[in-house]
C-alpha cells in the first residue's frame, strides 16, 4: 500500500515525520508499553494533515511504510490504508492546540492499572512530586497536576466530547487516561511528548506504589 502525498507536502517532510514516529514507537514497544499491536502515535505534518500509525501493526517493528497521512478530521489522505481506530483523539489535539506537533498513546501496565483505580474518582491528582516539572507549564512540585480518567468506549465521538467538555470547563489538560485502556499525551515536538509520557508513567507508578505500601 503506497502513500500518495498532496502536492503541498514535500516527500522529505512526510518521511521525516514517519521515521520519527517509527523510532519512538520501537522504543516505547521495547519498554513494554504497546502490548499486542495496541497504542498509536502521530505527528503533525502541516496545518491540515498529520502522519499516524496504520491500524493493527506491531509497534515494535514499525517502518516508514506503517505510517499514513490523515486530514484533521481523521480521514485517510492518498492511501487505502486504515488509520488507527482512535485517530479522532489525535486530530482533536492538533485542532485544539496549534503548537502541538506529536501525540503519543500507549497501554502500559502502570497506565492501565492506574486508569482502573482512579476511574471512579474521574481524576488522578498529582502533587508533591518533583517530576511534575517535566510537564510543560508546571514549574514547581507544589502545583496540582490533574490527569482526568474518562470512561472507555469504542465510540470515538463520545471520548472526543468528554475531552472537549474538560477543556470547555477551562481546566488545563496535559494528558488523560481512559479507563482500563491507556494514556494520551502530546507535546510541541516528539521530545516533549516523550518527556511527558515518561514522566507520567513514572508518576503513576509512584502513586500506585504509595497506594500499595500505605494500604
Ligand atoms: Zn488505545
Image (tube, helix red, strand yellow):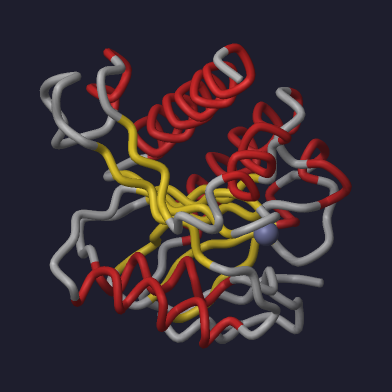
Q: Relative to 81, does residue 155 appear above or below in the rendering?
A: below
> Which image quarter holds the C terminus?
top right
Name which residue lies at 39% across and 62% down.
45
Quadrant including the N terminus: bottom right
| 189 up-or-down from 206: above or below | below
Farthest residue, direction front: 215
Image check: 144 left or right of 101?
Answer: left
Front-most of residues 166 and 124 = 124
In this rendering, the count of numbered labels is 0
Who's the residue at 70% across and 79% down the image? Answer: 154
User: Where does the image place residue 172, in percent across and percent down from the top left?
Assistant: 20, 54
Give whichever of 44, 165 is nearer the camera: 165
Q: Nearer the viewer, residue 150 or 61?
A: 150
Q: Quadrant of residue 108?
A: top right
Q: Is residue 26 above or below residue 171?
A: above
The residue shown at (44%, 53%) is 176
| Residue 54, x across and y down, in percent | 72, 64
Identify the residue at image location x=61%, y=71%.
86
Q: Quadrant of ligand 1?
A: bottom right
Looking at the image, residue 176 sits to the left or right of residue 87; the answer is left
**Residue 79, quarter of picture:** bottom right
* Residue lying farthest to the right in this orientation: 36
- Percent across and percent down for residue 20 are 53, 39
Residue 142 pos. (x, y %)? 14, 22
Amino acid at each position: 500500500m503506497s502513500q500518495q502525498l498532496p502536492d503541498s507536502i514535500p516527500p522529505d517532510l512526510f518521511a521525516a515525520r514517519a521515521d520519527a514516529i517509527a523510532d519512538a514507537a520501537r522504543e516505547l514497544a521495547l519498554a513494554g508499553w504497546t502490548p499486542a499491536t495496541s497504542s498509536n502515535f502521530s505527528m503533525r505534518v502541516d496545518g491540515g494533515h498529520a502522519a499516524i500509525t496504520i491500524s493493527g501493526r506491531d509497534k515494535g517493528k514499525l517502518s516508514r511504510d506503517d505510517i499514513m497521512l490523515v486530514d484533521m478530521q481523521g480521514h485517510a489522505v492518498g492511501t487505502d490504508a486504515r488509520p488507527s481506530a482512535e485517530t479522532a483523539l489525535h486530530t482533536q489535539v492538533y485542532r485544539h492546540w496549534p503548537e502541538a506537533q506529536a501525540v503519543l498513546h500507549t497501554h502500559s501496565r502502570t497506565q492501565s492499572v492506574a486508569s482502573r483505580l482512579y476511574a471512579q474518582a474521574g481524576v488522578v491528582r498529582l502533587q508533591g512530586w518533583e517530576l511534575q516539572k517535566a510537564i510543560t507549564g508546571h514549574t514547581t512540585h507544589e502545583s496540582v497536576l490533574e490527569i482526568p480518567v474518562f470512561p472507555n468506549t469504542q465510540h470515538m465521538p463520545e471520548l472526543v466530547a468528554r475531552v472537549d467538555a474538560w477543556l470547555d470547563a477551562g481546566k488545563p489538560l496535559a494528558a488523560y487516561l481512559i479507563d482500563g485502556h491507556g494514556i494520551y499525551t502530546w507535546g510541541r515536538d516528539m521530545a516533549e511528548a516523550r518527556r511527558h509520557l515518561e514522566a507520567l508513567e513514572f508518576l503513576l507508578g509512584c502513586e500506585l506504589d504509595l497506594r500499595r505500601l500505605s494500604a
